[in-house]
Amino acid sequence: MREKMPIIVAGAVTGLCAVILVLLGNPANMGFCIACFLRDIAGGLGLHRAAVVQYLRPEIAGLILGAFITSLFAKEFKAGGGASPLLRFILGMLMMSGALIFLGCPLRMILRLAGGDWNALVALPGYVAGVWIGVFFLKKGYSLGRSQEQPAVNGYVAPFMALALLVLAIAAPAFIFFSTEGPGAMHAPLAAALGAGLLVGILAQRSRLCTMGAIRDLILFKESHLFLGVASIFIAALIGNLIAGKFMPGFTGQPVAHNDALWNFLGMSVVGWAAVLAGGCPLRQLILAGEGQGDALFTVLGMITGAALIHNFGLAASAQGVPAAGKWSLLISAALLIIIGAGNIYRTAAGRNNKTASA
Amino acid sequence: MANYCYLTFPTTYFVLRAEVVLQETNLSFKLLPVPRSISSSCGTALRCSCADLDAIKNALQKAAVEIEGCFELAEKERPNRPVNRRKKMES
C-alpha cells in the first residue's frame, strides 16, 4: 500500500485541483485539459485564429516547470532524445486530431465523466480500444528506438519554453492573443492556474501518472498501479463536483462537448492509439519534457502544431458537432497510425541492427 | 529480509521480448511497474531472485534483448514495502 500512496495522492490532488480551477474560472469540466490548453496556447501565439480559444494557459507552463524542478531536485533530470523525433511530432499531431474531435484529452475525459458528462462514458471504451490497438503493435514488435543521452542544454529547452510562455502570459504584449469570449476567455487567475500546474506537475513526475499507461499495463501485465492514479483522479473530482454542485449528469447540453457518440468513441480511440505509439498520454508527454526528454517535447510541439492546423483547416469539433472534414481527417489519422505502427516493427534483433546501421 | 533483483529495459518492446524469451525457460520472474526507488520511468521491470539473475541475463543476451540496468532491492518481510536501499549493479 505504501508504494501505491504516491500515485493515489497524485490522482486525488489532480482531481481536486481540477475542480478548484473550474470554480475559479476555468470552463466547466476543464480544470485540466492538456489538448485543449495546448490548442489555446496555439491560439494565444497566433498560430490559429479561432477567436474563442486563444489563451496562454499557465497550467501547461506549471506542469512542465513542476516536473523540471522536482526532477532536478531528485537528480532524475536527464536530457535525452533522438528516438524518432519526427514521428513523435506526427504522433502529437494525431493525438491532437482525436482530442479535438472528442473535445478533450484523456484527463479531461475523466474530468468530464466526474462532472456527469455521460458522453465521456462512450469515449472511455474508445480510449481503451485505442490503447488495445496500440498494444497490438507493441506485441508485434513496434518500437521507436532507444533515446540517447544528450548534453544537458537540450533538456532545458522545454522548461525554457514554459518560462517564456509564462512571461508572455503575464506581460501580455500586443502580439499575443487573448480571447474575449468563449472557452478561451474563461480562466482561473494566473497565479492559481500556475500554482495548480506546478503542484500537479510535481506530483505527476514523482508518481509517473499516465492515463495511457494505466490501460496499457492492465492489458499487457494485469498491473493496476497506474490505474489507481486514474481512478483516484475520477473519485476526487467526482466528490469535489458533488460538493461544489458542479455535477450535471446527462448527454445533452454539456459544456464544451457534443453528443455524437460514434465520433466521441473514434476520437478517443485515435488518442489512445497514438498515445501508446508515442509512449505516453498528453499529460505524461509534458512531464517527460520537463524531465529533459526531447522526444516528448517533440510530441508536445506536434500537438501544438496539430491544434493550429486543425483549427485553421476547420477540422475541429464544437458543441454543434463534428464537421465532415473533421471526420475525414480522423480517418486519415487512423491510416497514418497504421503506417507509423507497421513501419516501426522490429521483427528480429538482426533486422533492427541492420536498420540502425543503414540509418 | 529478501533480496530481489530487478532488470530494466530501454523500451516496452524489450520487456515483451524478455517475457517471450524467459517463458521458454524454467526461470521464474515477474513483470511489474519499475519500482519508484529505481527510476522515474513509467515502464515495466522484471523482478527475479538474485540467484537466477545470471541465468536470466544470459538467456536475454543470447536473444539480443537489451537490458538497460540491473538493480538489487532489499525488501523487508512485508514484500510490498521495499527498503529504499538500492544498489546499481553492473549490467
Image (cartoon, coloured by chain):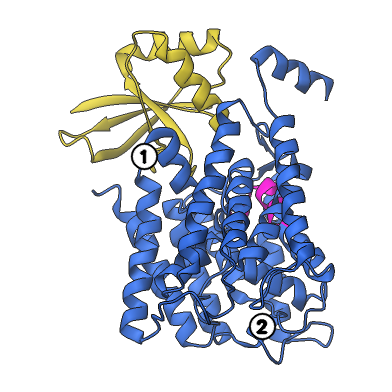
- Residue A165: image x %, image y %? 70, 73
- Please indicate whether residue A307 sits to the left or right of residue B65 in the image: right
Visible residue check, residue A219: yes
Tag 2 subunit? A
Above or below — where is A6 with respect to A86?
Answer: below
Q: Residue drawn 66% across and 64% down?
A: A101
Q: Does A19 appear above or below B81?
A: below
| Disc 2 target residue | A184
User: Which chain is assigned yellow?
Assistant: B
Q: In the shown orientation, is residue A313 left or right of residue A220?
A: right
Q: What element carries label 1?
A: loop
Magenta stretch, residue numbers:
A289-302
Residue at (50% x, 68% y) in the render: A119
**Badge 1 and badge 2 both on one subunit:** yes
Which tint was used for chain A? blue
Residue A306 occupies which quadrant of the picture? bottom right
Residue A293 shown in magenta? yes
**Circle 2 crowding by C-alpha within 10 Å: few under 14, some 14–19, many from 20:** many
What is the residue that sits farthest to the bottom in this orientation?
Answer: A180
Looking at marks 1 and 2 on the same chain, the residue that comes earlier in the sequence is marked by: 2
Q: Point out the image quarter for the C terminus of chain A.
A: top right
The circle drawn on residue A2 is none
Is A185 situated above or below A29? below
The percent coordinates of residue A193 (x first, y second) are: 54, 79
For disc 1, the marked residue is A223
- The 10 Å Cα crowd at callout 1, few under 14, some 14 to 19, many 20 or more, is some
Find residue A307 and report its horizontal and vertical position in percent.
74, 65
What amino acid type is highlighted by mark number 2? Gly
Q: Which amino acid does label 1 sit on?
A: Glu
